[in-house]
Amino acid sequence: MSQTLLVELEDAESLAEGEMRTYKAGPFEVLVCRVGGEFHAVENKCSHQARPLHQGRLRGHLIVCPVHGAAFDVRDGAHKSPPAMCGIERFTVVRSSEGWCVEVPEEAKKAPVDPFGRPPMMQVR
Ligand code: FES
C-alpha cells in the first residue's frame, strides 16, 4: 500500500469561491481550486502538452487549459474535452491540525528531478 505525505496548503482559507492557487508539494506543482465551498487539487500540468493550467479559466468544476482549450474536471482530474486525450493527476485535500493539506505520494520524495523541472507522473492511490 502506498504511503502519503501531507503538505500544508498555506492560507488556503483565503481562496474565494471560484479562485485557484498553485502550491509546491514535493516534485508536484498542485493547483488548488475552491468550488462549491470545497477545495479540489489537481496537478498544474495539462496532459496535452504539459503546459501549466493555472492561467486557464475555472468554470464550475472544469479547468480549461489556456493554451489549446482542453478541459478537466477538478474533482477527479478526468479529461472532458480535446485536444487532451487523458486526464490529469488529482490529489486529495484534507483538513489536519495544521490546516488544509494535500496528500502526495511518499515516493515523491525520492523521485528523480526532471532536468526541465517537470514532475513525474505518479498515481496518488
Ligand atoms: S497544452 Fe493544454 S490543451 Fe494543449
Image (cartoon, grey):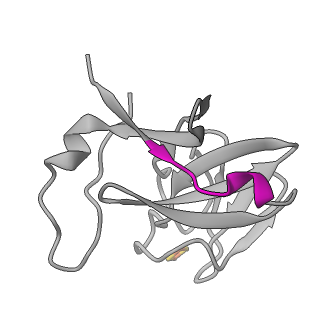
The reply, left or right, for residue 33 in relation to residue 26 is right
The reply, left or right, for residue 123 in relation to residue 88 is left
Figure quadrant of residue 120: bottom left
- Residue 90 in the image: x percent, y percent? 51, 44
Q: Which residue is rendered at x = 58% and y = 83% of the image?
A: 67
- Residue 111 in the image: x percent, y percent? 16, 52
Frontmost residue, 52 versus 110: 110
- Residue 42 in the image: x percent, y percent? 54, 52
Q: Is residue 54 above or below residue 3?
A: below
Residue 13 belongs to magenta span: yes
Residue 64 belongs to magenta span: no
- Residue 61 visible in the picture: no
Q: Is residue 104 above or below residue 46?
A: above
The reply, left or right, for residue 50 in relation to residue 122 is right
- Residue 66 in the image: x percent, y percent? 64, 80
Q: Residue furthest front?
A: 97
Q: Residue furthest top?
A: 1
* Quarter the N terminus occupies: top left
Figure quadrant of residue 68: bottom right
Q: Which contiguous range is marked in magenta?
A: 7-14
- Residue 99 visible in the picture: yes
Q: Residue furthest bottom?
A: 67
Frontmost residue, 48 versus 66: 66
Q: Which residue is rendered at x = 51% and y = 47% of the image?
A: 8
- The tally of labels here is 0
* Quarter the C terminus occupies: top left
